Image (cartoon, rainbow, N blue to C red):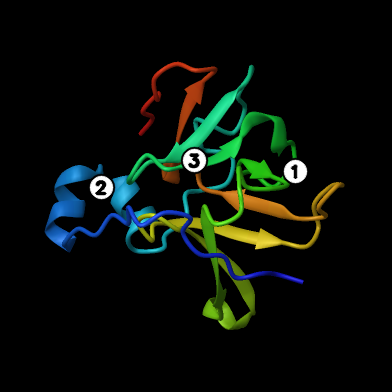
Amino acid sequence: MFRKTTARTGDTVVLTDEEWKARLTPERYAVLRRGGTEPAWSGELLHVEGSGTFTCAGCGAELFPTDTKFESVSGWPSFYRALDDGVVDEHTDRTFGIRRTEITCARCGGHLGHVFPDGPRPTGLRYCVNSLALEYRPGGGTTTSVG
């Protein structure tokens, strides 16, 4: 049902823990580098109007187009597919005594959220992503940093 993907390019971002702490806000560091989760309904990117691209807040990799975003009523931004094969990696997550599929940025390894098999057509997937793990770039403009 879930597939393992790998980065499309060789431009992997590798930083030390101290470099990540200097680069990210404490809230983003907790999510992207420590696998944390923001509270449901708290994310600034939960409701976004218009077209554009959601990028990784850690490294700027393009991850999800707005035309794949949908209202899942989960409390986090949700998408039915990633921008392209290989932009997110999937890993088995057994925290909290349950089996889930974690998604990470293929470029920098940052924790994004999880993917579930209860999304809409055409994929049937719901990529449930922390707003703190994302930045939004409207249209062809520059990335909007949030958090």
What is the spatial separation of the Cα atoms under label 1 and label 3, in whole angstroms? 14 Å
In this rendering, position of residue 145 left or right of residue 46: left
Disc 1 residue type?
Ser
Q: Which residue is mark 3?
A: 131
Task: Check disc 2: other Cα within 10 Å, few if <14, some if 14-19, many if 20+.
Answer: few
Which comes sooner in the sequence, label 2 or label 3?
A: 2
Q: Position of residue 85 (x, y in %)?
A: 61, 54
Q: What kind of element bears circle 1? A: loop
Q: Residue at x 52, y 78 (%)?
A: 95
x and y percent of residue 34 in the render?
A: 34, 63
Give the residue displayed 74% in from the left and 36% down from the top: 71
User: Which residue in the protein does label 1 denote?
Assistant: 72
Q: Which amino acid type is shown beneath numbered disc 3?
A: Ser
Instruction: Write down the quadrant of residue 61 in the picture.
Output: top left
The residue to which callout 2 is attached is 26
Q: Residue at x 76, y 55 (%)?
A: 125
Q: Identify which residue, 94 or 107, lies in the foreground.
A: 107
> Which residue is depicted at the point 56% across and 81% down?
94
User: Which quadrant of the figure has residue 10?
Assistant: bottom left
Say what secondary structure mark 3 lies in. Answer: helix
Q: Secondary structure at mark 2?
A: helix
85 sits left or right of 122 in the view: left
Q: Which mark is residue 8?
A: none
Measured from the top left, where is residue 44 in percent x and y? Answer: 49, 30
Quarter of the figure that contains the N terminus = bottom right
Q: Amino acid at mark 2?
A: Pro
Q: Is residue 26 left or right of residue 98?
A: left
